[in-house]
Structures are given as C-alpha cells and as structure tokens.
Image: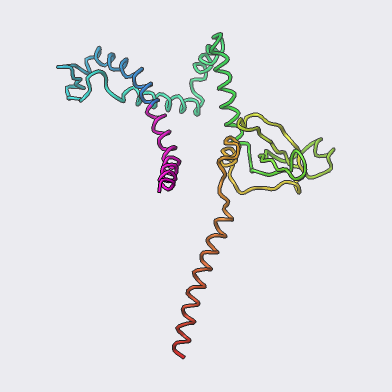
Amino acid sequence: MWKRFQKNIIAGIIFLLPAIATIYVIQLLFGLVDAFLGSFITDVLKALNIITTEDGRIYFLGVYTPFSERLLGIGFVLTILLITWVGAMRIQGKGLRIFGTIDRSFRKIPIANSIYTSVEQVIHAFAQERSSFKNVVLVEYPRKGLYTVGFQTGESRGEVQRVTSKDCINVFLPTTPNPTSGWLVLVPRDEVIVLNMTVEQGLKFIISGGVVVPPDPEAIVNDMETEYNERDMVVHVRSRRKDEDNE
C-alpha cells in the first residue's frame, strides 16, 4: 500500500512538474518586470492626472480599481508591447541606426560586454542551427558500432567532394548539453541513417543528454496495427462460434 502511494506521488510530481515550473517562471518574470515598471508608470499616470488616489485606492479615469500601490500588470503588458514593437522594427529593417547605437553601447561597457556578447553568440548560433539543419541523422562515430546523433547541414561540394571521390553529405555533430559547439564531418551518403525525428526533437534529445527520448512514429503505427489485428481476431472467433451453433 505504501509503495503504491509512493509511486502515485512520484508519477504525479513528474506529470505536474513541467506545468509548475512554467507557472513559477512566468510568475517570477511578471513580478520582477511589473514591480520595476508598474510603479514608474503609475507615478507617470498620476502626474498626468490620468489616475487619482482616494482612501488608499487608485481610480483610473475616475473608475474605481481594487489596487492601492500600483496598477497591477500594466508594467508587464507595456513590456510585452515594447518587445513586440522592437521585433516588428527589426523584421521591417527600421531603426537600424538606433539599434546599432544600442549594440555598440553595450559592447563598450567593461563587464556587461562579455555577458552581452556571450548571450548574443548563443542566441544567434541556436537560431542559425535550427534554420540550417535539414535532417537528424545517425553516423557510426567515433568507431564502428557506436552511433552519434548529428544534423545534416547540406551536400558536400567543391574540392572536398572531388578529393573524397564519394557522394558525401555535411553532418554537424553537436556536443552535449551545449549543441552550439561541435564539429563538422563529411560522411558518405550510404553510411548515414536519416531519422524521422524533427530538428527540435533532436536538439531536445542532445541537450537532455538522452533523457528526453522522442517517440518512434513507426513503433506507434505498429502498436496500432497490432491492436487492430487482435480486435479483428476476436471478432472473427466470435462469428465462427455463432456459425457452429447454427449448424
């Protein structure tokens, strides 16, 4: 009884932990951003007479609100709108001079420049990898009998293709748990096993060190076919018994 109770608790924690962690992170970000900008925006709105305070309560354009210190959520909403606006400007190619000035300013700060460049490199590498990776593959590396998960980045061409005299493809072999670093190998096409998993699933598999294993679609199809066949056999046996009774 106690062992079953422990198993149920562990199963419940494993199932609920991703949702709890997500809610915690969102709540933490909301609290930090809103506490920082919410009070500032509230003071600005007070100075503009857009909001007033009476009996320790905030009135927005004369309408009663249940808040006393600041308008809860207004700082977070403003941050989301600001990030969306910046993203739209970058996609449309506007404000390049302003963004360039901000970029150069961060690179000149003695301590912040190392943090800024490191985060920038990781983000750019991740974005470029996801867009440039074509397939998730398996190659026998570092020796026969051992397999390494990699990503096909393209076809081998030019001098390297001529020298090898084989039909090769370019495969990037990432490291665990940081897939932004790794090395390039040129592998003959007939020695590469192309997997059905997506690039996102392959990245999760590598980052987790093999803990997060993507499901096998062919195994799911085989299980469905086996289940269907078993049901079909049961129906067939029942119909046969009915025929024997009728005889």
Is residue 35 toward the left or the right of residue 100 in the image?
left
Is residue 181 toward the left or the right of residue 191 in the image?
left
The image quarter in which residue 43 lies: top left
Tell me which secondary structure the magenta stretch mostly adopts: helix
Residue at point 28%, 17% (across, down)? 42
The image quarter in which residue 171 lies: top right
The image quarter in which residue 150 lies: top right
Q: Position of residue 188 (x, y in %)?
A: 77, 44
Is residue 125 toward the left or the right of residue 29 in the image?
right
Query: In the image, is residue 22 part of the stretch drawn in magenta?
Result: yes
Residue at point 48%, 87% (across, down)? 244
Residue at point 72%, 34% (across, down)? 184
Q: Position of residue 115 (x, y in %)?
A: 55, 17
Is residue 98 depicted above or below 26 in this figure?
A: above
Q: Position of residue 200 (x, y in %)?
A: 56, 40
Is residue 158 depicted above or below 217 in this figure?
A: above
Q: Position of residue 105 (x, y in %)?
A: 53, 11
Query: In the image, is residue 247 part of the stretch drawn in magenta?
Result: no
Q: Give the residue furthest to the front.
A: 1
Q: Number of callouts in the render? A: 0
| Front residue (pair 244, 103) | 244
| Front residue (pair 218, 130) | 218
Magenta residues (range) = 1-27
Q: Give the residue furthest to the bottom.
A: 247
Residue at point 39%, 25% (across, down)? 28
Display coloring: rainbow
